[in-house]
Amino acid sequence: MIDPWLYPILTSVAVLAGFIDSIAGGGGLIMMPALLFAGVPPINALATNKLQSMFGTATACANYARKGLVDWRSNWVSIVLIFLASGAGVIVVQSVSSKALTLVIPLLLLAVAAYVLFSPRMSDEDAHERVSAKSYSPIGAAIGFYDGFFGPGTGSFFTTTLVGLRGLGLTRATALTKLFNLTSNVAAVLLFAIGGKMLWLLGFSMAAGAMLGGWIGSHTAMRFGAKVIRPLLVVLSLGLTARLLWSYFAG
C-alpha cells in the first residue's frame, strides 16, 4: 500500500523522467529508484513504470509525428518484431534473475557514451544508410526484448543504433526511438496487466506527469536538436552506468 502523500511526489518525479526520456531515453534511471525508495515491490515498480512511461512516450511520439519526423510505413516490420520481443522479455523477467545484466549493461552504455562523444555522425545530418529499415528489425527486436526484460538504457541503444546503422540524423533518430519505445511499452503494459502486477492508480497519476514532461522534452529536442540531445545521451549513459555498477557491487 502506497502512502497517499507519495502520489504527488512520484508524479512530480515522473515529469522530470518524462522530460529526460523524450530527449535521450533513460527516464527509468530516475523513476525506478524513486518507486523502489517509496516501497513499491520490484516487479510492481517495473510494471507501473512501464505504464507511466507509455503515456509520456506516446505524448513525445505524437509531437515528433506531427512534425513529420516519424516514418511509420517503412518501419512496420521493426514495430511488429519489437512488440513481440518486448512481450517475450516481460514473460522471461518474471521467472529469471536479471542481476547478471547489471554488470553487462554498463559496458554497453559506456560504449554508447563513447560513440556519442567521439563519433562525427552524432549530428542532425542524415548519413549513409548501412542497413535498411527491414535489415534493422532484428536489432530493434533484440533491444525490444531487453526493454521488456530489464529496460534501463533502451532509448540510448535505439538512438545510437539508428544513427550508426540507419544513418539517421540525431533528431530523426530520437523521434523514431520514441515510436519503438512506445511499441515496447505497450506490449509490456499488456502483459504486466494480465499478470496482475500493475498499480493502476499510482501508474495513471504518474502518467499525467510523464505526459507533461514528454510534451516539454520533445518540443525542446525539436527546437535545439543535436545540441541538447547529444550531451543528454552522454550524461544519461554515464549516469546509468554508475547506477547499475553501484547496484551490482552493493549487493
Image (tube, rainbow, N blue to C red):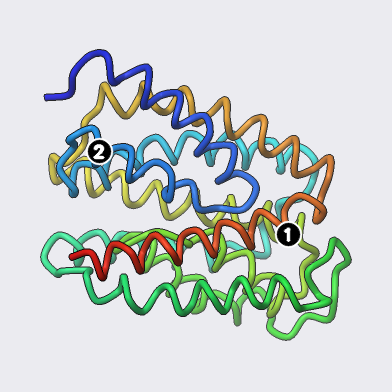
Q: Is residue 193 above or below residue 127?
A: above
Picture coordinates of residue 85, whole percent (x, y): 36, 67
What residue sits 28% from the left and 45% below the top? 190
Name the element at disc 1.
helix
**Quarter-of-image position of residue 246:** bottom left
Mark 2 is surrounded, within 10 Å at the Cα level, by few (under 14), some (14 to 19) or many (20 or more) other residues, namely few
All told, the count of numbered labels is: 2
The residue that mark 2 highlights is: 37
- Viewed as shown, does residue 99 lie left or right of 77? left
* Quarter of the rendering occupied by the N terminus: top left
Residue 8, above or below 246? above
Could you tell me which residue is drawn at 27 percent across and 47 percent down? Answer: 46
Q: Along the horizontal axis of the image, is 158 left or right of 209?
A: right
Q: In front: mark 2 or mark 1?
A: 2
On the picture, is 98 further left or further right than 237? left
Q: Quadrant of residue 123?
A: bottom right
Secondary structure under badge 2?
A: helix
Percent coordinates x, y for residue 193 in the rendering: 21, 40
First of labels 2, 1 by sequence position: 2
Label 1: how many Cα within 10 Å (few below 14, some 14–19, many 20+): some
Tag of residue 230? 1
Q: Name the one closer to the observer, 16 or 222.
A: 16
Look at label 2 and name its amino acid: Phe
Q: Residue at x 61, y 71 (%)?
A: 113
Q: Amino acid at mark 1?
A: Arg
Residue at 23% in and 14% down:
4
Q: Position of residue 34 (x, y in %)?
A: 33, 38
Q: Residue furthest top?
A: 4
